[in-house]
Image (cartoon, rainbow, N blue to C red):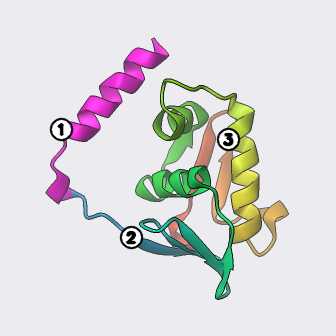
């Protein structure tokens, strides 16, 4: 069932009007600046190492800002249906992202945890 839903979402994404959503290339989140095209990240002007998956997770959260995104949605959209890591994998990537974005990663204000559901990127901090 999970694979079927992921495939349906993928078809819907491909058939949506591309002109309706303007593609964002660069964003700034807290201390982090991200270039989605080059997959580069900078904290206070210094380049930081970012994995491809970290950038994809941020891109997905950015496109769904102020909405709660479930761990399953992130798994389906970022990893796809071929490879399915555990939902704890998402938690570890979010932890790494918070360390780059937040002033105090232990008290997140930009990527919030919605307990039992997933995460929400808060745009008023963006």
List the residue tagged with mark 1: 15
Give yes or no for residue 16 being in the magenta stretch: yes
Would you say residue 9 sits in the magenta stretch?
yes
User: Which secondary structure class fits the magenta region best?
Assistant: helix
Q: Nearer the viewer, residue 119 or 101?
A: 101
Question: Which residue is at a point 35% across and 24% down the rendered structure image?
Answer: 7
Closer to us: 21 or 107: 21
Q: Is residue 115 visible?
A: no
Q: Secondary structure at mark 1?
A: helix
Name the residue that disc number 3 marks.
90
* Residue labelled with disc 2: 25
- Quadrant holding the N terminus: top left
Position in image of residue 112 (x %, y %): 66, 55
Rendered view: 123 above or below 90: below
Q: Does 52 appear above or below 23?
A: above
Q: Say left or right for 1 vs 90.
A: left
Question: Does residue 54 lie above or below 48 as drawn?
Answer: above
Q: State left or right for residue 59 relative to residue 46.
A: left
x, y percent for residue 75: 56, 34
Magenta stretch, residue numbers: 1-20
Residue nearest the viewer, comparing 125 with 81: 81
Question: What residue appears at the point 63 percent right and 35 percent down from the top-left corner?
Answer: 117
Q: CA distance from mark 2 to mark 3?
A: 23 Å
Question: In the rendered image, is residue 93 in sight?
Answer: yes
């Amino acid at each position: 069932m999970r694979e079927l839903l992921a495939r349906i979402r993928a078809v819907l994404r491909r058939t949506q009007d591309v002109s309706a959503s303007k593609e964002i290339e660069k964003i700034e989140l807290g201390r982090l600046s991200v270039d989605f095209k080059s997959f580069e990240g900078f904290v206070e002007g210094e380049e930081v190492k970012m994995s491809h998956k970290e950038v994809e997770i941020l891109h997905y959260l950015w496109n769904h800002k102020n909405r709660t995104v479930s761990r399953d949605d992130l798994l389906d959209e970022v990893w796809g249906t071929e490879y399915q890591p555990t939902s704890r994998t998402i938690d570890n990537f979010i932890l790494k992202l918070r360390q780059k974005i937040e002033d105090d990663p232990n008290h997140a204000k930009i990527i919030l945890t919605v307990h039992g559901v997933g995460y929400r990127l808060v745009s008023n901090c963006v």
